[in-house]
Image (cartoon, rainbow, N blue to C red):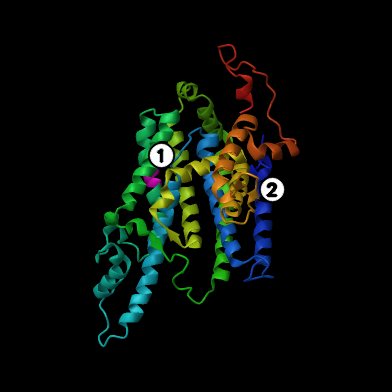
Amino acid sequence: MTRKPLILRNPSILIVLAVLAGFTLTVTLLSQAYGSGVIPTSMVKVLGKTLCLALAAVAMDLVWGYLGILSLGQMAFFALGGYMIGQWLMYARTEAIVAASMAQNPIPPTPAELQTGVANQIFGVVGSSDLPLVWSFAHSLPIQLALVVLVPGVLALVFGWLAFRSRVNGVYLSILTQAMTLALALWLFQNDSGFRGNNGLSGLQNIPGLEGVGQARLSVWFLWASALALGLAYLLAAWVISGKFGSVVRAIRDDETRVRFLGYPVEGFKLAVFTLAAMMTAIAGALYYPQAGIINPAELAPIASIYLAVWVAIGGRGRLYGAIIGAVVVSLLSSWFTGGRAPAIELPFYSVNWVDWWQVLLGVAFVLVTLFAPRGIAGIVDWLGGVMPPRRHGRDLGPDQGALQEQEAKA
């Protein structure tokens, strides 16, 4: 029997891509660069960054929702992707400025003098005049684009291989991923790390070679790129979780020991998904920070990865479109509440300022969703679409009675 195409087996793909295309077209037509100007450039950047966060949430859902690993280090890969593209953005822009300045000298500068001038401009703020070794390829855009996925991918591969071969699971693995993120952040905070310490990389919104293009148009271009990346990532993730590979991944989530006894290379499956998710998250970071304009080690704070897990949980863990919904809804609400747009509530005895209370509200929402709506917002979408879990009522699937309990059947 001929197998149905992926899109027919997973109708959510067409729905997500259609909604994404409609959203991108609507924002473009309402933008200041290509439309009526109803949506300001600052809001277009917020929406573009939100799509990048949705891409990171899809990667997080692959690791947590389908593989069962609560990784609290995903934002480390997100930031590394931003640092890799940020190196080229900052180097190329500074090189153009230094070259224009030195062009006025009677004698044209040599390449070594030009490089020294660039190093002084970039690293003078941390008391250095030498270009660090980690900036050896900062002048090359193709190499830095490759490093966007290679550096986080290699880090995930090495970390995953060490952790998975040691059979570290559960909360211990979550703590290890968080420790990895914290260690990387502490290293980047040092001035001699080669990434300007606490100053980070700035001016990333100024794209070299596009100085004549205004921010209004650049913001729309990045929105297009972010939407395209999210759509392709969703297709890739949907393909990964389909078929036999996806079935094995879910089985590892539900009962790793049984899958191991059946002869499957559990560590290989876990390592493949973990590394793939890291590279997807890095691409999201590489698109996010040119829109944000700056990146520093504070972006690697462990709380950032916890926020990512909260978005996936609220959206609906184990459903790729749920991860997108959670990231979009929560991140936009966060921008609204923390940006001072939400009106304060004046009580007789206290004034509720949402800038201070937003995190409390988010924590309460996470607890309520965990206790009373484990399917998250995606559960509502499933209910409206008539997609319900199989009612197997704990049918025995193993030698021991109750091998598959009711709650497992609903997972």
**Which amino acid type corresponds to the residue marked 1 in the rendered image?**
Gln
Q: Is residue 391 magenta?
A: no
Q: Is residue 373 left or right of residue 363?
A: right
User: Residue 314 falls in which quadrant of the image?
Assistant: top right
Mark yes or no: residue 146 visible: no
Residue at mark 1: 178
Residue at mark 2: 15
Above/below status of 36 relative to 18:
below
**Percent position (x, y) of residue 402?**
60, 14
**Percent position (x, y) of residue 3?**
65, 37
Q: Nearer the viewer, residue 250 or 320?
A: 320
Residue shown at 43% from the left, 37% from the top = 271
Quadrant, the N terminus: top right
Foreground: disc 2 or disc 1? 1
- Mark 1 Cα shell of 10 Å, populated few (<14), some (14-19), many (≥20): many
**Percent position (x, y) of residue 278?**
45, 45
Residue shown at 49% from the left, 60% from the top = 292
Q: Nearer the viewer, residue 344 or 346?
A: 346
Quadrant, the C terminus: top right
Q: Is residue 154 magenta?
A: yes
Above/below status of 331 relative to 260:
below
Q: Which residues are magenta?
A: 153-157
N-terminal of the pair, mark 2 or mark 1, is: 2
**Percent position (x, y) of residue 112?**
24, 72
User: Residue 46 falls in which quadrant of the image?
Assistant: bottom right
Residue shown at 47% from the left, 54% from the top = 285
Principal SS element in the magenta part? helix
Q: Nearer the viewer, residue 268 or 59?
A: 59
Mark yes or no: residue 350 visible: yes
**Which amino acid type corresponds to the residue marked 2 in the rendered image?**
Ile
Q: Is residue 305 left or right of residue 234?
A: left
